[in-house]
């Protein structure tokens, strides 16, 4: 009798204990589901915001391309890209609705992307006239736009040092140069190495001291179709969001040091004209693949000769430009940025085209005096360098507003060991050559790379 009562009580306790454990597990699982869903909502919201801005940019590009009857190929490609972006945004909104309606997350919007309420988008048909700029965009030399600010680093192809350094600093975007003639397979190890660390590559098609052939320019289509959104490299992978979004066409081709000339010279004008033609050929080749990859054009010459000559060769140049690039080192950066804005606007380029600062930085060897620093303190210590990085980046963002796209710091690491040279070019690194930190300089770069 007593044994049966004790057994019965033990059984009852066991049932109660199991029930309590079950409730605790359920509550814990529910809590983790809510946390996971909240993180997923935040991630999708960011992706949807980017997709919305991409869609707006492509609406403008499609309207410009399809208004020009002579360029039906570019119009068709622009319309394809616009449809893809519209489909992607619709999918993201559907995912977001599912998460917020069924995931138990409070305080999250139930529809739209970060408050967006845009409906389906219809691509313009060929011959559709360009509409007036929407609110927030204007003609002339105003500084408007809706680009996504993308901080990053100039880096290299060395997986042991460059990838490690970029990862240490927290970079999510790096600018890496490849020869323009490089086959798509030649980018594989670098793209894959950075992707393994969650870093997207912004490739620079280089041709220092020369100009590319038509075949080399159109070779960029293979880069775009392989590594761009939906490219063959990303098939079966889960990190397709790291696909390349642009290809920079040459590095400082508008500067004279590579060619032994300068503004005002006949060779300078001829180079700008050929550059524009080759850029057009590259953009058309990329557009024919359907890849949503823009071509970035240089507009970095205070005299205006470079931009004028480009447009003399290709009057509708801005139809092919995914962004204007500039390297505004030193103390005169405000005038240089304004020159770019004014010069391109004078040729009718819309203010919706982003401005990408693909190089900018300061040289510092911890207080050791250098040969030059573009008008800045030649003997600045690491803390002063960090303060300069922070204040200048903020001032540039304030000046360009929504037009500022990429902001690429130069560079990941020093080119020489501390104290072994006075050459400024050796000490632009955010890290020392051996990947050791540079005090306040490194901290400022890490903070910038973490910003949005």
Image (cartoon, rainbow, N blue to C red):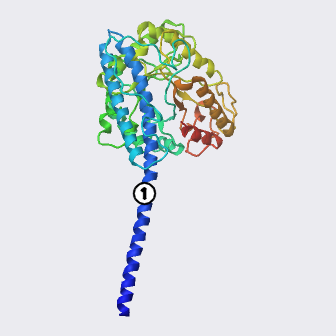
Q: Residue at x 49, y 30 (%)?
A: 148
Q: Does 14 sit left or right of 396 as displayed? A: left
* Coordinates of residue 195 in the picture (x, y in percent): 40, 41
The answer to which of 86 and 247 lies nearer the viewer is 86
Position above or below: 173 against 437: above
Q: Does 290 sit left or right of 367 as displayed? A: left
Badge 1 marks a residue whose secondary structure is: helix
Q: Residue at x 33, y 18 (%)?
A: 284
The answer to which of 331 and 392 lies nearer the viewer is 392
Q: Does 200 sit left or right of 255 as displayed? A: left
Position above or below: 307 against 174: above
Task: Report which quarter residue 71 is drawn in.
Answer: top left
Q: How many marks?
A: 1
The answer to which of 44 and 336 lies nearer the viewer is 44
Q: Where is mark 1, residue-wise?
A: 30
Question: Can residue 278 be seen by looking at this rendering?
Answer: no
Task: Report which quarter residue 180 is drawn in.
Answer: top left
* Coordinates of residue 270 in the picture (x, y in percent): 45, 9
Question: Can residue 41 be seen by looking at this rendering?
Answer: yes
Position above or below: 410 against 58: below
Residue sitting farthest toward the bottom: 1
* Coordinates of residue 289 in the picture (x, y in percent): 29, 25
Task: Report which quarter residue 61 is drawn in.
Answer: top left
Q: Quadrant of the N terminus?
A: bottom left
Residues packed near mark 1 inside 10 Å, few (<14), some (14 to 19) or many (20 plus)? some
Q: Residue at x 62, y 21 (%)?
A: 334
The answer to which of 414 and 305 lies nearer the viewer is 305
Position above or below: 179 against 40: above
* Coordinates of residue 264 in the picture (x, y in percent): 54, 7
């Amino acid at each position: 009798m007593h044994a049966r009562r004790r057994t019965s009580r033990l059984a009852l306790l066991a049932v109660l204990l199991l029930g309590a454990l079950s409730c605790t597990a359920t509550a814990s699982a529910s809590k983790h589901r809510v946390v996971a869903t909240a993180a997923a909502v935040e991630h999708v919201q960011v992706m949807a915001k980017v997709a919305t801005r991409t869609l707006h940019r492509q609406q403008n590009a499609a309207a410009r391309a399809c208004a020009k009857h002579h360029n039906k190929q570019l119009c068709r490609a622009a319309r394809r890209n616009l449809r893809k972006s519209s489909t992607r945004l619709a999918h993201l909104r559907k995912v977001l609705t599912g998460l917020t309606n069924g995931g138990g997350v409070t305080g999250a919007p139930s529809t739209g992307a970060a408050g967006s309420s845009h409906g389906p988008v219809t691509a313009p048909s060929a011959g559709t006239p360009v509409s007036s700029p929407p609110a927030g965009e204007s003609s002339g030399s105003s500084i408007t736009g809706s680009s996504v600010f993308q901080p990053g680093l100039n880096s290299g192809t060395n997986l042991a040092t460059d990838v490690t350094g970029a990862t240490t600093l927290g970079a999510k975007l790096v600018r890496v140069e490849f020869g323009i003639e490089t086959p798509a397979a030649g980018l594989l190890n670098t793209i894959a190495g950075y992707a393994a660390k969650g870093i997207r590559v912004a490739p620079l098609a280089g041709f220092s001291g020369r100009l590319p052939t038509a075949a080399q320019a159109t070779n960029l289509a293979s880069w775009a179709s392989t590594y761009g959104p939906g490219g063959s490299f990303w098939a079966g992978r889960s990190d397709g969001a790291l696909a390349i979004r642009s290809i920079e066409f040459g590095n400082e081709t508008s500067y004279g040091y590579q060619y032994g000339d300068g503004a005002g010279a006949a060779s300078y004008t001829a180079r700008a004209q050929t550059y524009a033609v080759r850029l057009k050929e590259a953009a058309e080749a990329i557009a024919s693949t359907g890849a949503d990859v823009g071509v970035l054009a240089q507009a970095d010459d205070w005299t205006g000769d470079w931009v004028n000559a480009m447009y003399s060769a290709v009057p509708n140049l801005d139809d092919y430009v995914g962004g204007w690039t500039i390297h505004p080192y030193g103390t005169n950066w405000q005038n240089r940025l304004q020159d770019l804005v004014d010069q391109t606007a004078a040729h009718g380029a819309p203010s919706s085209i982003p401005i990408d600062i693909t190089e900018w930085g300061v040289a510092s060897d911890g207080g050791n005096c250098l040969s030059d620093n573009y008008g800045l303190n030649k003997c600045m210590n690491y803390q002063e360098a960090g303060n300069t990085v922070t204040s200048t980046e903020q001032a540039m963002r304030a000046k360009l507003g929504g037009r500022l796209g990429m902001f690429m710091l130069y560079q990941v690491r020093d080119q020489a060991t501390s104290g072994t040279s006075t050459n400024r070019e050796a000490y632009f690194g955010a890290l020392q050559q051996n990947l050791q930190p540079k005090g306040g300089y490194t901290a400022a770069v890490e903070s910038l790379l973490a910003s949005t």
